[in-house]
Amino acid sequence: MQEFKGSQYVYGFDVLPQAGSLAASLGKKVLFVCDRFPGSESHAACIRSSLTAAGLEICGEIDGAAPNAPREDLARITEAVRSTNPGVVVSFGGGSTIDAAKAAAVLGSVGGTVEDYFGTGLVTAKLASSGGKLIPHLAIQTAASSGAHLTKYSNITDLATGQKKLIVDDAIVPPRALFDYGVTLSAPPALTADGALDGVSHCLEVLYGAVGKPSYPLIADVAAAGIRMVLEYLPKVMANPADRTGREALGLATDLGAYSIMLGGTNGAHLTSFSLIDILSHGRACALMNPYYTVFFAPAIQEPLKLVARICEDTGVAKRPIAQLSGRDLGVAVAEVLIGFIQSLGLPARLSDVPGFSGAHIERALTAAKNPQLRMKLENMPVPLTAEMVDDYMGPVLQAAASGDLAVIRNVP
């Protein structure tokens, strides 16, 4: 992580009191965007004390965002940014609150609507054309999950349509970040599992998409370490939530997931997850979908599949040798192991097992995949698809995810 972020990122146990010194390097007048959850007030109080001890003025405090960063919460936080005119935004929360704070800093700094920035590089383009600057942001993470405190992504959801969209831009990477892994000790099992599975999905999808690229050796090192730690330590933390070694491992693993998506990009499972927000948490949706995309991508990702297969064998998640397989057979074997791991956590591995699922979700996902604002996910696939290919090839992947039948997945010739 030192190679990734250097002194801009402080992480580990008992580091929350360093928030003030980090924020002081960005500005003097603070808008504090703060999640509320059981046990959060003592952490928030520590942050406030640290800010004031560093000589900063807290000009406003506002609640964070609900899961999936709804547009309504973005509007509320944006209004707070505009009304307080802070020198720095300090967010304390999970990925949704941090994502909303990122987008609010954009809207509060250079104006427009969030629709103006969905896609890739549009914030940077606006800054270049306007000569504006973004209000700096200290992101303080509370969950071992999305890695939002370290990345160029902001996911914002329209709850009316049930569709999530994405801002992708280096300009919104928080210039300072902090993650005290001790905050995660009180995380409930469902949140712990969802977050870890989101992190492993980041690693897995970036690894799959890195085949043939000069960055593959570095991505393989980073992603493999993250995947290995989740497979090894998530079951231990689920059994013993107070396991500090396990909590640290999951924090590091999901941070490596963030490093991965800054080296590459996610693809199929993340794209589909954006259309499942009304029935599944983000991490759970990505984890459910990845085995099915693994089979679809298999002929094109043999090297990373063998790496993942060896990790599954080493950690005991694979109950039989699978790394010697090849082609689609290797993809099916890895997919079956991932499905088994998900089921061992008591989570659904088929969409048909998810309450509220219907064929409308498949239609929504196929329609979203053709939206130009989400094109980067299609292009990041190890088997790139055009909008015209979505129904023929992504359609069977989604049908397989609904039924659990891997045989219906078609590989591109």
Image (spheres, helix red, strand yellow):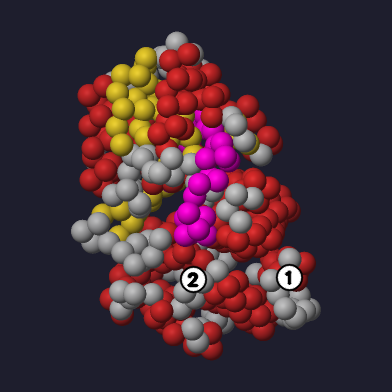
Q: What residue type is labelled 2?
A: Leu
* Residue 61 picture location, percent across and down: 31, 27
Magenta span of residues: 168-194
User: What x and y, as percent, mark residue 79?
Assistant: 22, 32
Instruction: Left or right? Give the position of 250 relative to 214.
Output: left
Viewer can see residue 190 = yes
Amino acid marked by disc 1: Gly
Q: Residues within 10 Å of mark 1 (few under 14, many from 20)?
A: few
Q: Name the residue under label 2.
A: 347
Image quarter where the C terminus lies is bottom right
Image-quadrant location for residue 2: top right
Quick check: 50 above or below 63?
above
Question: Residue visible at 23% across and 45% down?
Answer: 72
Identify whether 252 is placed above or below 374: above
Residue 180 colored in magenta in the image:
yes
Q: Mark 1 points at which residue?
A: 316
Give the residue drawn at x 38%, y 58%. Answer: 374
Left-right relation of 411 to 27: right
- Residue at 45% in and 20% down: 49
Confirm whether the magenta stretch covers residue 149: no
Residue 348 position in % (x across, y down): 47, 74
Q: Which numbered disc, 2 or 1, marks the residue that appears first in the sequence?
A: 1
Q: Residue 20 carries which label?
A: none
Q: Which quadrant holds the N terminus?
A: top right
Along the line of sight, the residue nearer the viewer: 252 or 370 = 252
